[in-house]
Amino acid sequence: MSRIGEHPILEYTKGKRVSFTFDGKVIQGYEGESIASALHAAGIRKLHESEVKRRPRGLFCAIGNCSSCLCRVDGRENVRICIEPLREGMRVESQNSKAVLRPADPAGSIRQEETIQTDVLVIGGGPAGLNAAIESASHGLKVVMLDRNSLLGGQLNKQTHKFFGSEKAKAGTRGFVIAQELEEKLAGYGSVDVQKETTALGYFKDGTVMAESKGRVCSYRAKATIIATGASERTLIFPGNDLPGIYGAGAVQTLMNIDGIMPGQTAVMVGGGNIGLIVSYQLLQAGVAVAAVVEAAPHFGGYQVHANKLRRAGVPILTGHTVKYAFGGDSLEGVVITALDEHFNPVPGTEQTIKADILCMAVGLSPMTEMFFQAGCDMKFIPQLGGYVPRIDEYHRTSVPGLYAAGDAGGVEEATSAQLTGRIAALCAARDLGAADDFDREFADLQSQLSELRAGPLGQKILSGLDRMKDEGGVSYGKF
Ligand SMILES: Cc1cc2nc3c(=O)[nH]c(=O)nc-3n(C[C@H](O)[C@H](O)[C@H](O)COP(=O)(O)OP(=O)(O)OC[C@H]3O[C@@H](n4cnc5c(N)ncnc54)[C@H](O)[C@@H]3O)c2cc1C
Ligand code: FES
């Protein structure tokens, strides 16, 4: 692994060069990049071993969702090193599944007794959360926004291609530029307190939200809380699927597009939807060979324009294929793929071995719904929206008073709709708090933008999911 030199779109600005140790070995990296990225740049993918079988384990999501990168940092257990910014002199150690819970710090530094009061609490600073915070502030409300990452923007930060859609939806602008613009806009509102590197841990019955930031526990009490925690990437079940070098597509994007690191030399992409096709092209832009895109369905699901770019670059898109198993020692060395029949059963004798050090999974996302479950929201299983989602009404209110859902957390869609649902949830919260004077006009405008977006071919799945939600007593049923 190495750092990307020239990139056709991106320029990487780096912090100062720093030294740190990993299991006693001195390693160099750049201040502010994640510890996991610095380790990858130094060729270290194995971060720890599983407890029973001592299998090597590495990074999977690179956005703090999956826990596969937990390490001990300066004596602190269970640090997600994929979102922990690197600093000079850090001591990073493999936990090897043996985290030790330490007693509470007698100096009291892990607890903050004071509860922070606000009008609106936004949990998650991706496109949905950023828009929710901006919308709330534009109605004169006091806002606190939490994000566990040091970088706001969520998945948008990694998206280097120009967005499709209408001008209002920022068509023609690259995803990471949209994230920067939203953050700048948010900074223009003095009534917003942005708390980065702060993870919301729990939503209590009285509406209190507990969060952790750098070893401190904080609590928040808001008149309205908007949950915009996004979605986590799925994987597939096959032998060897835990080897370091098998990543969610978003993790590969983080390494390449945020930290400028080559995730490896040769990749196999699993999934022919838009994410799989776009990330495959981004791998080529970073100088990584893409041996194949493997898609189980008889047709790929992404836009033709993305597929054409890959085919022109000589990347085969193998529909009706899946991964049989992955192999390697301390990290991935290759995969065996197989053809599938019309019932998705492997066809004997069609196996092919592909040497690869990256297997990238773009096989769907599941909404991050833990906080809704904790809050006691009425939850529904709606496959078209990604799995379990909170039942919401047309104002994005959950069944728990004062609790709203926005973005992928309320149903997996895409970045532009996440922005719109963030604004809708915040507008409706402002109305419920008596702060939205021109509610009807703005609500109708946002709803019409969302309908226009969903009128496209990929919107059909979402619309059928929303129909199912309607049948379950949500969406157009208005009030609970
Ligand atoms: C690999 C990949 C590629 C994609 N490519 C495209 C694309 O090309 N075009 C497109 O339109 N869409 C794309 N999408 C989808 C799009 O990025 C998402 O739909 C969109 O980012 C959802 O926005 P969100 O704000 O709901 O969630 P996210 O962008 O996921 O943001 C959620 C935020 O919440 C924070 N968070 C989560 N849990 C907590 C917690 N407990 N406490 C504090 N903070 C928390 C996270 O750190 C994150 O910043 C892609 C998604 C992925 C995974
Ligand atoms: S939490 Fe770090 S890789 Fe998923």
Image: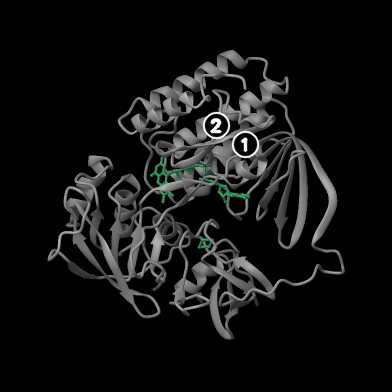
Element under disc 2: loop
Question: Quick one: SS at disc 1?
Answer: loop
In this view, the residue in front, 49 or 189, is 49
Identify the residue shown where x is 67% and y is 41%.
375
Q: Label 1: few (<14), some or many (≥20) within 10 Å? A: some
Q: Quadrant of residue 284?
A: bottom left
Q: Residue at x 21, y 55 (%)?
A: 345
Q: Are discs 1 and 2 less than 8 Å apart at CB?
A: yes
Q: Nearer the viewer, residue 372 or 426?
A: 372
Choose between 196 and 172: the one closer to the eye: 196
Identify the coloring.
one colour
Q: Amino acid at mark 1?
A: Cys
Left or right of 423: which side holds 336?
A: left
Q: Residues within 10 Å of mark 2 (few under 14, many from 20)?
A: many
Give the numbered dot on residue 105: none
**Location of residue 233 in the rendering, given as x and y in whole percent from the top left corner:** 44, 52
Q: Residue at x 51, y 24 (%)?
A: 475
Q: Quadrant of the C terminus?
A: top right
Q: Does residue 181 appear in the picture of this structure? A: yes
Give the vertical position of 475 relative to 358 (above or below): above
Specify the quadrant that holds the N terminus. Answer: bottom left
What amino acid does circle 2 point to? Arg
Question: Would you name the residue on which mark 1 appears?
Answer: 377
- Mark number, residue 391: 2
Task: Answer above or below: position of 298 versus 215.
Answer: above
